[in-house]
Image (tube, rainbow, N blue to C red):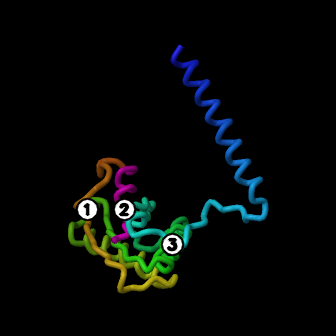
Amino acid sequence: MKTNYLKSVTSALAVLFCLVSFAAMAGNPDAPARKKDDVPKKMSPKALANLKIKNIQFGFNKATIPDNAHGNLKNVAKLMIDNNASLKLGGYADNKGAYVYNWMLSKARAEAVKAYLVQNGADSSRIAATEYGYTHPIASNQTPTGRQKNRRVEIHFTN
C-alpha cells in the first residue's frame, strides 16, 4: 500500500517538475540555455563557503594536475575572480612510502593546484596551500581504491 502511494507521489512530482520547467522555458524563450558547467558569477561569502567542490585526485607518486580536473579548477578560478574570494587548499597523500616523502608530495600537490589557479587568473595572495601528508585519510589505506581517494587536494572557500 505504502509503495503504491510513494510511486504515485513520485510520478506526480516528476510530472509537476516537467511542467514547471517547461513553463519557465516558455515564459522566456530568448533566455540562453544554461549549460551544466555554467557557474554563477556573484555569490555571497556564506554560499561560497558552503560550496562543495570535488576533490582533485592524483595518481600514485604524482603531483601533476590530471586532465579531468582542468574544468573544475577553471570554474574555481572564475569564482575566485568574480567574487574576490579566498580559499584553502589541503594536499594529502596515501600511506605508501616514507612519512617525510609523502608530506613533501602532498605539499607539491597543493602547490600544483595553486599554480594552476594563479595561471587561470586567481590572486595568489588569496590562496593558502597546506600539506597534510597521510595524516587525514578519508578512506582506508589498506585497499588500492582507498589509497586512490586519499591522494587528493581538497578545496574550500573561506569567508
Q: CA distance from mark 3 to mark 1?
A: 35 Å
149 falls in the magenta region: yes
Q: Quadrant of residue 100?
A: bottom left
Task: Give me the residue at 73% from left, 64% from top.
Answer: 31
The answer to whether the residue labelled 3 contacts the one labelled 1, judged by CB atoms less than 8 Å apart, is no
User: How many neighbours does mark 1 have within 10 angstroms: few (below 14), some (14-19), or many (20 or more)?
Assistant: many
Q: Nearer the viewer, mark 2 or mark 3?
A: 3
Q: How many marks?
A: 3
Q: Which mark is residue 42?
A: 3
Question: Which type of secondary structure does the marked residue at label 2 adopt?
Answer: loop
Q: Which residue is mark 1?
A: 134
Q: Where residue 109 sits: x, y (%)?
A: 37, 73
Which residue type carries mark 1? Answer: Tyr
Task: Give me the residue at 60% from left, 66% from top.
Answer: 38
Q: Which residue is mark 2?
A: 151
The answer to which of 105 and 119 lies nearer the viewer is: 119
Which span is picked out in magenta? 144-159
Q: Quadrant of the C terminus?
A: bottom left
102 sits left or right of 60 in the view: left
22 sits left or right of 49 in the view: right
Q: Residue furthest front?
A: 27
The answer to whether the residue labelled 1 contacts the one labelled 2, judged by CB atoms less than 8 Å apart, is no
Which residue type carries mark 3? Answer: Lys
Residue 159 visible in the picture: yes
